[in-house]
Amino acid sequence: MTHDDFLHDARMQQQVGVVFGQQILQYTQALCQGNFDYLERLPNDLLLQILAFLELKDVAQLAQTTKRFHKLCNSPEFWEQTVRGRCDELTPDMEALANAMGWRKIFFAFFNTKEHQQYAQGGS
């Protein structure tokens, strides 16, 4: 069956909805219509590299879009990357403290500027 055939076969769509649920049916319909979500297919490591180029206010907004981005934007890996990217001289003491307390807490303790306060208020 072609994509076009599937889109015009109400019976087949109904069966897919019953067997797999409405969410899968909607996703399948979107795929058949040519709507691909390429970001969802990217691995977390690559997404973290992309996030490194965003302002924190944009990361906060992205974190509100899907469960996956919420988890990724609040992950220890993201916050470690953020601290390391903004701190020219990360001392072993700071790194040990970050590992013990969490990289996010260290970030807001040491880099508490207006931009970062906006992230804390808008983000998770």
Image: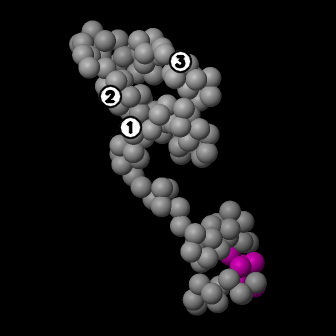
Quadrant placement of the N terminus: bottom right
Magenta span has 14? yes
Percent of width and height locating residue 28 = 61, 72
Query: Looking at this rendering, what residue extends furthest in the top direction?
Result: 93
Nearest to N terminus: mark 2 or mark 1: 1
For the residues labelled 3 and 1, the Cα–Cα distance comes to 19 Å
Residue under the image location 45 percent in, 38 percent down:
54
User: In the rendered structure, are the residues bearing label 3 and label 2 in contact, judged by CB atoms less than 8 Å apart?
Assistant: no
For the residues labelled 2 and 1, the Cα–Cα distance comes to 8 Å
What is the secondary structure assignment of the residue under circle 2?
helix
Residue under the image location 67 percent in, 70 percent down:
25
What is the secondary structure assignment of the residue under circle 1?
loop
Report whether 61 appears left or right of 102.
right
Q: Disc number at residue 4?
A: none
Considering only vertical position in the picture, is 100 above or below 15?
Answer: above
* Amino acid, disc 1: Ala
Q: Disc number at residue 52?
A: 1
Q: Give the labeled residue for mark 2.
A: 85
* Amino acid, disc 3: Lys
Nearest to N terminus: mark 3 or mark 1: 1
Residue under the image location 35 percent in, 31 percent down:
81
Considering only vertical position in the picture, is 9 above or below 101?
Answer: below
Q: Nearer the viewer, mark 3 or mark 2?
A: 3
Report whether 61 appears left or right of 7.
left
Q: Give the labeled residue for mark 3.
A: 114
Considering only vertical position in the picture, is 112 above or below 9?
Answer: above
* Amino acid, disc 2: Gly
Q: Is residue 63 among what the camera can see?
A: no
Percent of width and height locating residue 118 = 58, 23
User: In the rendered structure, are the residues bearing label 2 and label 1 in contact, judged by CB atoms less than 8 Å apart?
Assistant: yes
- The magenta span reads 11-16
Quadrant placement of the C terminus: top right
